[in-house]
Image (cartoon, helix red, strand yellow):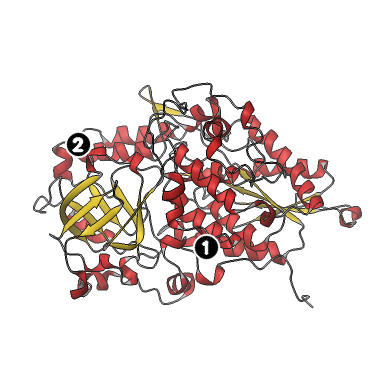
Amino acid sequence: MRRGLPADAFDGRPHIAIANTASDLTPCNAHLDEVARSVANGVYEAGGIPLDLPVVSLGETQVRPTAMLWRNMAAMATEEMLRANPIDGVVLLGGCDKTIPALLMAACSVDLPAVVVPGGPMLTGTFRGVPLGCGTDVWKLSEEVRAGTLSERAFLDSESSMIRSKGHCNTMGTASTMGLLAEVLGMTLPGIAGIPAADSRLLAASHATGVLAVDLVNRDHRPSAVLTRGSFHNAIVALAALGGSTNAVVHLLAIAGRAGIDLTLDDFDRIGAEVPLLVDLQPAGRFLMEDFHRAGGLHAVLAQVADRLDPAAITVTGRPLVEPLPAAQVWDAEVIRSRAEPLQPHAGIAVLRGNLAPDGAVIKPAAASPHLLRHRGPAVVFDSVEDLHARLDDPALDITADSVIVLRGCGPKGYPGMPEVANTPIPAKLLAEGVRDMVRICDGRMSGTAYGTVVLHVSPEAAADGPLSRVRTGDMIVLDVPARTLHVEADLDTRDPSPEFLAALARPKRGWERLYVDTVRQADTGADLDFLLGASGDKVPRESH
Ligand code: FES
């Protein structure tokens, strides 16, 4: 917009901010300026005034040390700008992993009428005739480079073949998962999530979202009227049926914390464990988001598990989430399985507890190797990512396929920011022997596009004096996913944290990192800052002059 407005723009008609995370440094969201224009047209059509509001953008591939360090900052900055500016409602444009969670956290804390437009996934790219999944195949092919079975040149060619259109990662990674869950939570126009970024139907739906945003203001329909415990129940059911990213656990807990909903880590296991896995998408499966949309998309999946959804949960339209589901159909039963023939009868996120994770840890069984879900093996401990990189490929490292790789110092406080490093590489000498998966345990996260038998989000983290800080190389670790336990056969209470580990910890002296480390909560509650929980509403008490 950024142009002169006629005087009647200020006659009381709704002013709709378009909170836009477009940035050249966030390639997954770079097309959102085009989406914003369609939203703006819809706002005008409905009698409102659209106003650009650029907000903090977080590009997963560019931001260091990890975009997760800045999720809460993006949420806080967006919240404050939504409150501080004279607006009546907001359309939230996100895509790349942290952007939709941050925008939803902000919207909950301000509680102005709000609606999300998910930016949509990239189109499928192929390399040597084979479809490639963003992220997932990067991990796989980079292992092949390390194993010496793929050249660097071919690897670079594969990467550029993979990224052939605008949009975010096209696997069921964090961006796809959170875009879909934004709709399940009721915070989008029904039917919009999963439309590929390059599909003209996304612009049509964005236009309709602009119209809806004005209607939301006219009805004073706020996130607090949409988001209930039932909405989060439905999101957990959907997360399981979709085979969505483990990162959604942290993000949903954080959003619930802003919305004042009492959601716990155990809800994910309790609600999701019996839900069948219906979607055969990478990273655990075969297909990609373009296939998912072609096969019927989110509504086709929700229709299969409609009996497990809370029928009372509504969307921004004011109508029930489940209302359109009877009309949904599956058009490709290979991509979206029927309830009678699921990929797995029980999906979801398993929550593990034990003397290694008193407050919980998570694993995604669907992305793990079945033979490792019950495993006992000796720990090989790394005190930091740098320690891991320095020693993992050392031929002299005493490690076998039965070992358990323990990587600590990667939690919210420890890194800081809880990076996606938990799916550590397999040691080169084991790769050469054909080993492609091992049990790995970490207080950090794993990319939603990654896979493997990886125990994540161990809470409390090692840097918060969690038991992980006292484990030593050689300790026997016992993982039993069916029993939901994670133990180490050692008396950790008699030990002190390793001095090497304490020396490797990040101790930021100033700025955001200092504030973050001092106030961030643990992963089992969503890793938000302690003073950002809850909402403050949209009222500004004092004038500027
Ligand atoms: Fe942006 Fe994957 S890098 S969604």
Nearer mark to the viewer, of 2 and 1: 1
Nearest the viewer among 247 and 315 is 315
Name the secondary structure under disc 2: loop
- 10 Å neighbourhood of mark 2: few (<14), some, or many (≥20)? few
Number of marks: 2
From mark 2 to mark 1, how far is it between C-alphas? 40 Å
User: Which residue matches tag 1?
Assistant: 72
Q: Residue at x 33, y 61 (%)?
A: 410
N-term-proximal mark, 2 vs 1:
1
Rendered location of residue 43, percent (x, y): 78, 45
At label 2, which amino acid type do we have? Gly
Residue 98 vertical position relative to residue 273 in the rendered view, above or below = below
User: Which residue matches tag 2?
Assistant: 148
Task: Report if the beta carbon of the residue with label 1 is closer than 8 angstroms to ligand 1.
Answer: no
Rendered location of residue 211, percent (x, y): 77, 42
The C terminus sits in image quarter: bottom right
At label 1, which amino acid type do we have? Asn
Q: Residue at x 51, y 50 (%)?
A: 25
Is residue 47 visible in the rendered structure shown here? yes
Rendered location of residue 76, percent (x, y): 58, 65
Q: In the rendering, which numbered label is found on residue 334?
A: none
Nearest the viewer among 245 and 20 is 245
